[in-house]
Amino acid sequence: MIDERERISMVVDKVIEMFQPDPARIRFDDPFYALVSIILSQNTSTKNVRAAMERFRRRFNSVEAVAFASLKSIQEAIKPAGLWRMKAPRIKLIARQIAEGRIDLRKVLSMPYPEAKRTLMSLDGVGPKTADVFLMFARGEHVLPIDTHIFRVMRRLGIAREKDDYEVVRSKLESAVKPEKRISAHLALIEFGRRICTARNPKCGECPFSKICPSSRVLR
Ligand code: SF4
């Protein structure tokens, strides 16, 4: 009988092998646009995030331009992204706080992880996941952020319990995944959740974990 850490490690190695993510393809030249891109990526395909970011950057060339723009013009710019109506006020709120000097994102990038995360989360509209994803992509922090797909997959596999919150699941996964593998693990687990262990009608028949998964729909 394998223990939980071995199970997590086995699942992560398998999904990395399946999807072979390339963390190097994700690069940001400006921390504010990195944060916007992370917000846009929720419930949105990579292709549509790219389209929304191109429109957004064409329309707004500075954080101040976003901070004082109308909500409608931000919504219009990010329309290719899912949930654009809800995301626009969040982007504007964050831009406003940065423009007012509440936080300097470049300084945050040189802080130790706990301080950097705490500082990011002091912004209204930035929670632990957004802060972790930002630090992971903007400076290669060895953290393993848990998005909605990863949460679902871990619950179905019996690794995350119902009562486990974001930090509990993150530390469970991080205790089993080597630091240098965490970005790939994050990207591959999201792909697995999007393509195989989908929210509705998971494809258990195609899943390599169907024999060990307590939620499998495959008859055993
Ligand atoms: S067996 Fe089904 S429910 Fe379990 S991880 Fe695979 S796809 Fe998800």
Image (cartoon, rainbow, N blue to C red):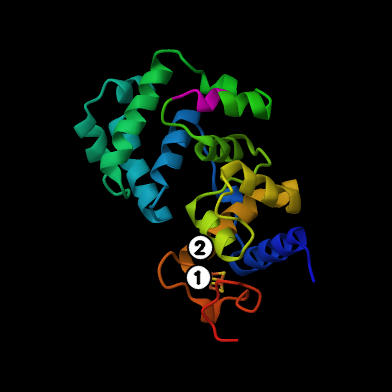
Classify mark 2: residues with Cα within 10 Å, few (<14), some (14-19) or many (20+): many
Q: Amino acid at mark 2?
A: Gly
Can residue 109 be seen? no
179 left or right, relative to 37: right
Image position of 21 (left or right of 112): left
- Mark 2 secondary-structure assignment: helix
Q: Which residue is mark 2?
A: 193
Residue under circle 1? 196
User: Could you tell me residue 181's position as x and y percent?
Assistant: 70, 52
Give the magenta range.
119-123
- Residue most toward the top? 101
Q: x, y percentage for residue 75? A: 24, 38
Question: Which residue lies at the image location 35% right of the left edge and 25% below the top edge?
Answer: 93
Q: Is residue 147 above or below residue 71?
A: below
- In the image, 28 versus 147, the foreground residue is 147
- Looking at the rendering, in which quadrant would you find the N terminus? bottom right
Q: Does the stretch in magenta take in 121?
A: yes
Compared with 157, 131 (above or below) is: above
